[in-house]
Image (spheres, helix red, strand yellow):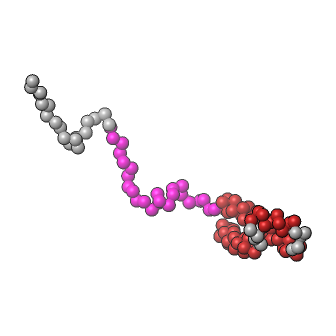
Amino acid sequence: MLYGIIISFITLICVLLIIVVLLQPGQKEGLSGGLAAGMAGGASMGARRTADLLSKTTSILAALFLSLSVLANFAIDRTGTSQSTIQQQGGFGDPIERSDFTVPSQTETAVPQQDEFSIEE
């Protein structure tokens, strides 16, 4: 129950984080565009406050995402069995018996036996 609620909040935070990141303005041609805009005398002061607000919002949402993800790990219900899902669904039967490898095998070898030929000189 608690795990489902936490996952719902994580999903909501992910959607909000995507929206906030997409709303942030670009850097206008990379690093050189950012430096040139700074030397122009700050012609876009109104956009700067919006960018600061979006940057802080991104940091807060990222911190919430990280903390809720760690909290969700501890909220998982672990009262079930200690086997994995594959082991529970497997139906593999009894484990393979241990073989005594010192005793020769009763099966025929895969390599054909060669007769020894004597070389006459």
Residue at (62, 62) in percent of width and height: 77
Residue 94 location (% of width, % of height): 38, 52
Q: Is residue 51 left or right of residue 95?
A: right
Q: Is residue 57 magenta?
A: no
Quarter of image, res 106: top left
Residue 65 location (% of width, % of height): 72, 65
Q: Is residue 108 left or right of residue 56?
A: left
Can you see residue 40?
yes
Quarter of image, res 108: top left
Residue at (66, 67) in percent of width and height: 3
Q: Quadrant of the C terminus?
A: top left
Q: Nearer the viewer, residue 118 or 29?
A: 29
Q: Is residue 89 left or right of residue 80?
A: left
Quarter of image, res 2: bottom right
Q: Which residues are magenta?
A: 76-100
Up the image or down, 15 lies above or below 102; here it is below
Secondary structure mainly formed by the magenta segment: loop
